[in-house]
């Protein structure tokens, strides 16, 4: 049986490669991580997206993040969010699912699925119009999870690109509001990238104001804070 399984795995791998090659002839593409032709994500870039969730902290909020937002990861996420490369969604969804799982275990070690609601951070109206989809909601769906839309943006928030830490905090303050009372709700925040944490901290504030308890957060990737007061990133929401 072991030999038969190996033969079947080899056949499936060869068949998948042949299908991808045929598809590449009909619909030429490039790897969104490195530009290699004929693959949405090449083997090397897929390997770079192998997730290892780790706990990081923004003030007193624990965030479980699957990847570091640099190199291949950064290029793939930017291409996915702002370049329409939704063909990277399956690989990114695996990373997000692992981060969410780690966060749930940390929040409730004895009962992973018990009563914790996943809440996504909403995109700005401008980002929604430009993209035509919500990046985090799409990834959750691909991961077999479902987020709840318990937050909505208020008008007037500027784009976060190029802002420093305190500017991000000031820019985000008061920009989100809960869609309904949340007394008794236990919530895990879910987003794509955490940089300064301004967005997640503002989301927590809005949810707490409505009576919810935020037990933590999970993201696909994290920008390491080597110089937290002056760091810049391409986080777009």
Image (cartoon, helix red, strand yellow):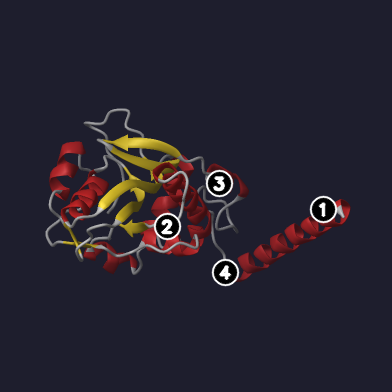
The image position of residue 211, as x and y in percent, is 19, 55
Q: Earlier in the sequence, mark 4 or mark 3?
A: 4
How far apart, in angstroms, are the residues tagged by discs 2 and 1?
34 Å
Q: Which residue is mark 2?
A: 80
- Secondary element type, mark 1: helix
In the foreground, 44 or 202? 202
Which quadrant holds the N terminus? bottom right
Let me know if residue 144 appears in the view.
Answer: yes
In the foreground, 154 or 161? 154
Q: Earlier in the sequence, mark 3 or mark 2?
A: 3
The image position of residue 203, as x and y in percent, is 23, 52
Q: For the point 28% across and 49% down, which residue is it?
A: 214
Asked whether the residues under the numbered discs 4 and 3 touch, taking CB atoms below 8 Å apart as contact, a structural biologist would say no
Q: Earlier in the sequence, mark 2 or mark 1?
A: 1
How far apart, in angstroms, are the residues tagged by discs 4 and 3?
20 Å
| Left or right: 220 in relation to 42 | left
Work out whether 228 lies above or below 156: above
């Amino acid at each position: 049986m072991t030999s038969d399984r190996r033969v079947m795995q080899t056949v499936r791998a060869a068949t998948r490669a042949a299908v991808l090659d045929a598809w590449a002839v009909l619909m030429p593409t490039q790897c969104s991580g490195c530009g290699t032709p004929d693959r949405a994500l090449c083997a090397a870039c897929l390997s770079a997206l192998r997730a290892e969730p780790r706990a990081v902290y923004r003030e007193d909020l624990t965030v479980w993040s699957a990847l570091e937002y640099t190199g291949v990861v950064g290029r793939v996420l930017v291409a996915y969010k702002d370049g329409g490369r939704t063909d990277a969604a399956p690989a990114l969804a695996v990373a997000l699912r692992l981060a969410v799982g780690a966060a749930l275990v940390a929040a409730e070690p004895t009962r992973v699925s018990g009563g914790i609601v996943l809440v996504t951070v909403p995109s700005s109206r401008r980002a929604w119009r430009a993209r035509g989809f919500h990046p985090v909601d799409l990834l959750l769906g691909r991961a077999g999870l479902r987020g709840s839309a318990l937050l909505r943006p208020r008008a007037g928030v500027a784009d976060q690109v190029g802002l420093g830490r305190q500017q991000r905090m000031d820019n985000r303050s008061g920009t989100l509001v809960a869609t309904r009372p949340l007394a008794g709700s236990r919530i895990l925040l879910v987003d794509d990238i955490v940089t300064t944490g301004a967005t997640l901290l503002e989301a927590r504030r809005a949810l707490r104001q409505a009576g919810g308890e935020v037990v933590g957060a999970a993201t696909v990737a994290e920008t390491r804070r080597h110089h937290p007061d002056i760091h810049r990133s391409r986080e777009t929401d």
